[in-house]
Image (spheres, rainbow, N blue to C red):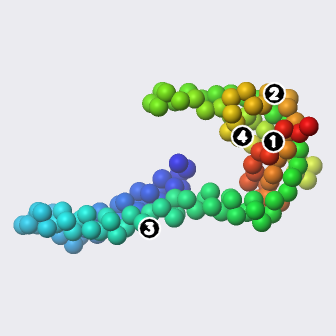
Amino acid sequence: MGELQSVVLLLCLGIPIGIVIMWVGINAKNKWKDFISFIKVMLIATPFCFPPLDFPSMYMEYNLQKYKTMTSGIVTNTFSKYYSRGGTTSYWADIDYYYNGQVVKGQCWMNPGEYKIGDSVLVFYSSDIPEFYELAGKKH
């Protein structure tokens, strides 16, 4: 989760909590009624939390669809990350691709052993925002 998404999540959760505290007060006499009011506010606020959290990925997908351009790139590094909590490993490739004669550096998720250092790859990128990209596969 990015920094902006974390802030939005905290605001989405903090605002309803603040509203409930203001409405019922800390020294309320009927605690069950206050608790039910709090749950109602949280249920009402929850659906409004998800669109802001998903907006960056939706914008990237939209931008890629609208301004999709293909170029070639090269795999400069491959590595894996092990997550001890879930006991899972993810595999990544560092990609350099070309946009208007400049090299743009990116990182893509991959299947184990799918790419090797030095492989030529095809990359779809947005001509509007070249940092938005997705890997299209190996170049034959």
The residue tagged 3 is 48
Helix, strand or loop for disc 2? loop
Identity of the amino acid at label 1?
Gly
Q: Position of residue 136 (x, y in %)?
A: 80, 46
Give the distance between the C-alpha atoms of the residues marked 3 and 2, in whole angstroms: 43 Å
Can residue 104 be seen at all in this image of the molecule?
Answer: no
The structure residue drawn at horizontal position 68% and vertical position 59%, both measured from the top left corner, is 60
Mark 4 or 2 closer to N-term? 4
Above or below, comparing residue 53 to residue 92 in the picture: below
Along the polypeptide, which appears first: circle 4 or circle 1? 4
Q: Within 10 angstroms of label 4, few (less than 14), some, or many (20 or more) residues?
A: some
- The residue sitting at 6% across, 67% down in the picture is 29
Q: Residue at x 61, y 32 (%)?
A: 90
Of the residues under marks 4 and 3, which one precedes in the sequence?
A: 3
Mark 4 vs mark 1, foreground winner is 1
Q: Residues within 10 Å of mark 2 (few under 14, many from 20)?
A: few
In the image, farthest residue toward the left: 29
> Badge 4 is on which residue?
107
The quadrant in which the C terminus is found is top right
Looking at the image, tell me whether mark 1 or mark 2 is earlier in sequence order: 2
Question: How many angstroms separate mark 3 from mark 1 (CA)?
Answer: 37 Å
Give x and y (percent) for residue 16. 32, 66
Could you tell which of marks 3 and 1 lies nearer the N-terminus? Answer: 3
Element type at mark 3: helix
Q: Residues within 10 Å of mark 3 (few under 14, many from 20)?
A: few
Residue linked to disc 2: 117
Residue that numbered label 1 is attached to = 137
